[in-house]
Image: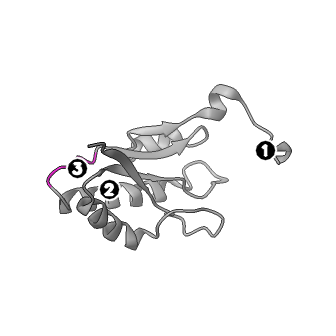
Amino acid sequence: GIVQDILIEVNIGAEASKSGADPQLAHRLAALAGQMEHVRLRGLMAIPPISTKEGENRRFFAEMRQLFVDITEKKYDNESTMDILSMGMSGDFENAIREGATLVRIGTAIYGERDYSKKG
């Protein structure tokens, strides 16, 4: 009787270095999730390409917002309530919020820069 809440990760910038579904496949994944008895689709998540200029990646946030709206309107099942749009990190969360993010990840702003080169 356990139901797992999930987010579909979208590779909104089509970056080879990142995982996530192609935006065109997100609808199909949402439909598949809607058929699974023990899965509840809560929303979408994405990490857009790193921007070097202020606001440069805002278009990716806007594209994610539109994809979120489109999938929500399809209502692939009658049980899921998509209410999470996870996008934006310490360096760009303001623009993510402007474009509709409901969940942001601000670890660096809290914990500082991390050195991942020492992980084995």
- Quadrant location, the N terminus: top left
The CA span between labels 3 and 2 is 13 Å
First along the sequence among labels 1 and 3? 3
Q: Is residue 54 above or below residue 22?
A: above
Please name the amino acid that badge 2 sits on. Phe
Residue identifier under label 1: 116
Q: Nearer the viewer, residue 65 or 116?
A: 116
Task: Classify residue 20 as left or right of residue 116.
Answer: left
Query: Which disc is residue 80 wearing?
Result: 3
Magenta span has 79? Answer: yes
Q: Is residue 36 above or below residue 103?
A: below
The x, y position of residue 27, in whole percent, is 31, 68
Identified at 63% across, 70% down, the residue is: 16
Task: State the SS at label 1.
Answer: helix
Q: How is the model colour-coded?
A: one colour
Q: Is residue 62 above or below residue 26?
A: above
First along the sequence among labels 1 and 2? 2
Which picture quadrant has residue 17?
Answer: bottom right
The CA span between labels 1 and 3 is 36 Å
Whether pointer 1 and pointer 3 mark residues with C-beta atoms closer than 8 Å, the reply is: no
First along the sequence among labels 3 and 2? 2
Residue identifier under label 2: 68
Q: Residues within 10 Å of mark 1 (few under 14, many from 20)?
A: few
The x, y position of residue 75, in whole percent, is 18, 59
Task: Classify residue 113 as left or right of residue 55.
Answer: right
Magenta stretch, residue numbers: 78-82
The x, y position of residue 105, in whole percent, is 54, 38
Which picture quadrant has residue 100?
Answer: top left
Considering every residue shown, the one lying at the far top of the view is: 110
